Image: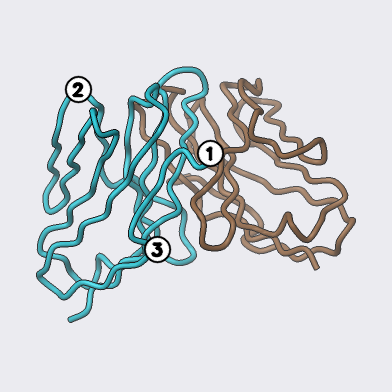
Chain colours: A cyan, B brown
Amino acid sequence: QQQVKQSPQSLIVQKGGISIINCAYENTAFDYFPWYQQFPGKGPALLIAIRPDVSEKKEGRFTISFNKSAKQFSLHIMDSQPGDSATYFCAASTGAGSYQLTFGKGTKLSVIP
Amino acid sequence: GAGVSQTPSNKVTEKGKYVELRCDPISGHTALYWYRQSLGQGPEFLIYFQGTGAADDSGLPNDRFFAVRPEGSVSTLKIQRTERGDSAVYLCASSLYGGANTEAFFGQGTRLTVV
């Protein structure tokens, strides 16, 4: 059972545009929602994270929007740049116990000039 | 070291052989995680160490998989009687302590290919 569903699988955005990636979760015990960025041949790197007590968090060009009642959260990349081309993963954890992360399947973002 | 280091970067082994994958976490990090990432998928949790002990090994797929962290630093993931389905990138991550508010830093992974 996939506990975190991510869409779209791939995304092509023009330079300067807005990239939007969506995730939905099922486990209501999740209370930590990070986004990771992964370049080919590299491990995932934390981009931005949110906890469910806020509905939005912004860091530079990256914003997480969180809808607790809908059990959905999304990543917005403003003014997308070619250097943003990577695979993005949403994840979730319960914040207790082992703090293991449950990842979505990833979105491959390509930003074209 | 500056980051999480995993060796080897690539490992090709024959079906049925035994392999060991090594992870050097960031110095001082007490929490260490192993994940497995299959092609086109997100990482899947395997095991979590807090110090020397395996606090959660619920993600290990079967008893062919085992991991140790004897001195609370370096960890080794061991796979016995490898199968072609074990082919994946094995990722190690560490964090200062095992908490949801602490960032987990990932290594570059070991790409295991079983032929």
Question: Where is residue A106 shown, x and y percent of the image?
Answer: 41, 56
Q: Which residue is mark 1?
A: B25
Chain under disc 1: B
Going by the image, does A56 lie left or right of A108?
left
CA gap between label 1 and label 2 equals 31 Å
Q: Amino acid at mark 1?
A: Pro
Q: Which quarter of the figure has residue B32?
A: top right
What's the residue at 22%, 79% (across, down)? A112
Which residue in the rendered view is the most extreme toward the front? A70
Disc 1, SS: loop
Residue B17's tag is none
Q: Which residue is mark 3?
A: A39
Q: Is residue B60 above or below residue B84?
A: above
Question: Where is residue A17 shown, x and y percent of the image?
Answer: 11, 68
Going by the image, does B39 lie left or right of A16?
right
Q: Which residue is mark 2?
A: A53
Q: Is residue A32 above or below residue B37?
A: above
Going by the image, does B63 lie left or right of A18?
right
Q: Quick one: label 1, few (<14), some, or many (20+) residues within 10 Å?
A: many
